[in-house]
Image (tube, rainbow, N blue to C red):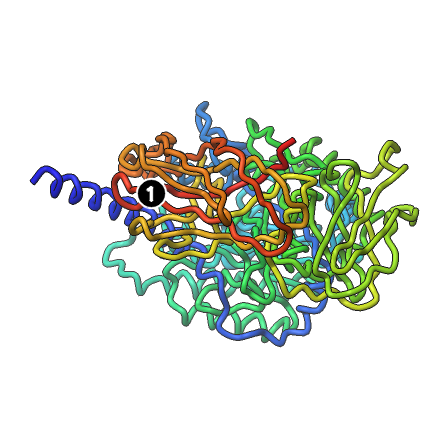
Amino acid sequence: MNKICFIFLAMSLFWSWQSVSAEKQQSMDEMWGDEKIDQQSQNPGLKWFTEDKYAMFIHWGLYSEMAGDWKGETYYGIGEWIMNMASIPVDEYKAYAKNFNPDRFDAIELVRLAKAAGMKTIVITAKHHDGFAMFDSKASDFTVVKASPCKRDLMKELADACHAEGIRFGFYYSQNNDWTEPYGGKYKGTRPKGYTPKDFSIYFEQKVAPQVTELLTGYGHISVIWFDTPGGMPRQYSRQLVDLVKKHQPECLINSRIGGGYGDYVSLGDMHIPTIRPKQKVWETVDTTNNSWSYAWYDQNWKSPKTICERLISVVARGGSYMLNIGPKGDGTIPEAAVYSLKRSGAWLKAHGEAIYGAKASPFKQGFYWGDITSKENELYLHIFEWPEGGKLRLSGLGARAQSAVLLHDNSKLELSQNGPLIEVSLGSEVGRNLPLIPVIKLSLDAPAKVTDQAKQVDGLGPVTLHGETANTKGCRVQKERWMEKFGEWVHYEYVAGWQDVDAEASWDLNVIEPGKYMLSLEYACTHENAGSEWVVSSGDESITFVTYESGYDPSKKTIHKGDAPRGARLRNFTIPLGVLELSESGEAQLKISPRNLVGAGGISIKAVTLEPYR
């Protein structure tokens, strides 16, 4: 009887966890809209979009003046949501516009910063969820021209500067959420008497359609209009917006967050740098220079120039485009740390643009421990984040012969050899000299690379990480999770979970270039109920048995941040050493993980297994 009760309790906890996970995933997908479009766009603008690769996103508005504070209290999270986080009454929020006077805003200076960073397009928030228009609109009095002492059409200034400087220009527009409009989505005040959801049409017809028309007809050529958070907005309104854009600017691109399955390309979830190549044909990642999208006084977590370059490269290597955000201050100036990182990463891009602009994805679905690859015809560009041991780099299975290898920034030749499918490049005497932020090797082949074997290469020169989302699964599954650490700061997480019984297994295909001993480590999450179960990791006749420990993850608990609704607990991982395992033969191999027994239901959540040469 006790055993039956225990099993029932364990299963209840497991399905409770799955329910929490599903709810969080659903709420985010509902807000952003599905990351898909119903049919492939034929918009000719996709040509420049897929070639340019790099754009500047700007979140700037009334919230920038607040900078994360309201009435002497700091609200940690993305700054543009402060009205929501601090529960600011509509009248008080609107009245705050009298404090917004960005008299130090210089559109030309901003555009030239984007150019120095190597960005080809600027997209700026014309209206965010707070409803405040950063342009002169006849459809609303809550605008920078009418409600603030600024009295300048800031969007007109920026549009003119972009056109003058040869930078593409686009608008962000929040079409569904409007916290200061009685009939808008997620209105923060008291709805009018007799309100029903159908009254959304009043907001759409009186504000959204007129304002989008103003943006499309009063600011010259618009390259992209970036919609956001369609949520539960009826599909008919997405269709009307598509028709509106195509009527006034036929080649203007529309992102997937317009909702309803429409759009010319897919915008992935905020800050999502995919580990493997997404299924979508044309897609982008939107990211930030720090944590918040708009300026927040306390947010000093600035991405370094090298990190910016690495994230740009990783996106292009997976076949996407990258739009990186800055948040100007309330006075219109750009934080110095953002300027520094953009200019320095831009200097790298100026010397290595050949490997980014117009580049295609890597022939490999994943990156490498040393960096990543972009491609053009018969050329591969090997972006070296960290040099492998001894300054050597190995690649196998390209389906072509290597002709030459040079450092892209100065065309200096590198040592190159090929033995069958295995290519080895060595920095040789170049190791000790001053190299760029990220060295790039241009590897020329006698034909375009064609990789038919996507097994993870184990070359004996550096650590190899096997990600949970790339596993082959039997009796378990790959799950995706997204959550916010602080409000609006998204974490994207893929892992193997849902282990059904002791016959379940996760496996990874390996291409062993260098046989030998490897130290294995495991990154995973484990609840209190699942702690103490025994597991086996194996390859061929070699195996290691280990026991799991609680990682501090309790899916039954909910967390509350100031100004935020309760939500499910986040996954908490830790990494443990498993031991030494020998891969005794070169060629094809598999690494497997399976439970010897299961304590509780569902087992552990595996994020990654790492193999490091054992010396």
- The answer to whether residue 190 is above or below residue 195 is above
Q: Name which residue lies at 92% across and 47% down.
A: 412
Please, is residue 366 above or below residue 247 in the view?
above
The quadrant in which the N terminus is found is top left
**Extreme left residue here?**
1
Please state if 434 lies on the left or on the right of 329 as rendered: right
Q: Which corner quadrant of the image does residue 439 belong to?
A: top right
Element marked by disc 1: loop
Q: How many marks?
A: 1
Residue 24 x, y percent position in the rendering? 36, 48
Question: Could you tell me which residue is drawn at 56 percent across and 35 percent down?
Answer: 519
Query: Residue visible at 87% across and 60% down?
Result: 403
Q: Amino acid at mark 1?
A: Arg
On the rendered structure, is 377 left or right of 277? right
> What is the quadrant of residue 236 in the picture?
bottom left
Mark 1 surroundings within 10 Å by alpha-carbon count, few (fewer than 14), some (14 through 19), many (20 or more) = some
Q: Position of residue 113 (x, y in %)?
A: 76, 43
User: Is 103 or 520 nearer to us in this picture?
Assistant: 520
**531 sits left or right of 211 in the view:** left
- Farthest residue toward the top? 72
Q: Residue at x 16, y 44 (%)?
A: 8
- Closer to the camera, 448 or 272? 448
Q: In the rendering, at what x and y percent does residue 73 appear?
A: 44, 24
The x, y position of residue 262, in whole percent, is 50, 69
Q: Is residue 258 visible?
A: yes
If the image is split into quadrants, where does the C terminus sit? top right
Query: Is residue 152 visible in the rendered structure shown here?
Result: no
Q: Which residue has dot 1 on it?
A: 596
Q: Nearer the viewer, residue 460 or 155?
A: 460
